[in-house]
């Protein structure tokens, strides 16, 4: 029900914008989170945006470089703008939606997941 897109190969210092889109519902009442996973490691919460006031959260590792935002026109899209990318940002990125109010980076609190999009940052 969710689809993440926008991944690709980029050199260190470059930028990518990931998109998360829903096919059957709008994001108005959902908090949206972005997670990433490297093979052999646990999935990591990167950023999230709450419903309502749109408060945001960023992991320390991406703070100041990544920005999450809702598309207020489309209402079923959320973006993750990733700037100043580093090789350690390389991972499969997933978006997820949760029905419980409030932003969270706890994986188990999300109800719907996209299939993931690969981001590779070369040094």
Image (cartoon, rainbow, N blue to C red):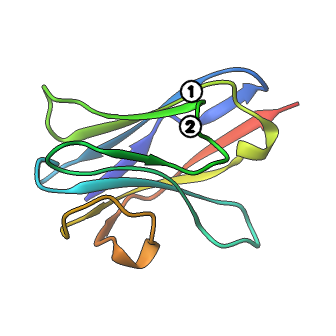
The residue at the far right in this view is 123
Residue at the extreme bottom: 108
Q: Residues within 10 Å of mark 2 (few under 14, many from 20)?
A: some
In-image side of 1 versus 56 (left or right)? left
Q: Does residue 82 appear to the left or right of 123 in the view shown?
A: left
Q: Which residue is mark 2?
A: 7
Residue that appears at 61% across and 25% down: 83
Q: Relative to 42, does residue 30 appear above or below in the rendering?
A: above
Residue at 25 percent across and 59 percent down: it is 1
Residue 112 lies in quadrant: bottom left
Relative to 16, 51 lies left or right: left
Residue 1, relative to residue 15: is it above or below?
Answer: below
Check disc 1 and report the residue beneath it.
Answer: 16
Does label 1 or label 2 sit earlier along the sequence? 2
Pointers 1 and 2 in contact (C-beta within 8 Å): yes
State which quarter of the image contains the C terminus: top right
**Residue 114 locus on image (x, y percent):** 38, 58
Q: Is residue 28 above or below residue 81?
A: below
The image shows residue 69 at horizontal and vertical percentages of: 33, 33
Q: Nearer the viewer, residue 81 or 94?
A: 81
Q: Quadrant of residue 37?
A: bottom right
Q: Mark 2: which secondary structure?
A: loop
Circle 1 sits in a helix, a strand or a loop, which is it? strand
């Amino acid at each position: 029900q969710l689809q993440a897109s926008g991944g690709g190969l980029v050199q260190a210092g470059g930028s990518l914008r990931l998109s998360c889109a829903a096919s059957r519902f709008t994001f108005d009442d959902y908090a949206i989170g972005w997670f990433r996973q490297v093979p052999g490691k646990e999935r990591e919460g990167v950023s999230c945006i709450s419903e309502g006031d749109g408060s945001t959260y960023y992991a320390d590792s991406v703070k100041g470089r990544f920005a999450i935002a809702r598309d207020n026109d489309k209402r079923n899209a959320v973006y993750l703008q990733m700037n100043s990318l580093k090789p350690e940002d390389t991972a499969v990125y997933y978006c997820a939606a949760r029905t419980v109010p409030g932003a969270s980076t706890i994986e188990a609190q999300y109800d719907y997941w996209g299939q993931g999009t690969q981001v590779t940052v070369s040094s």
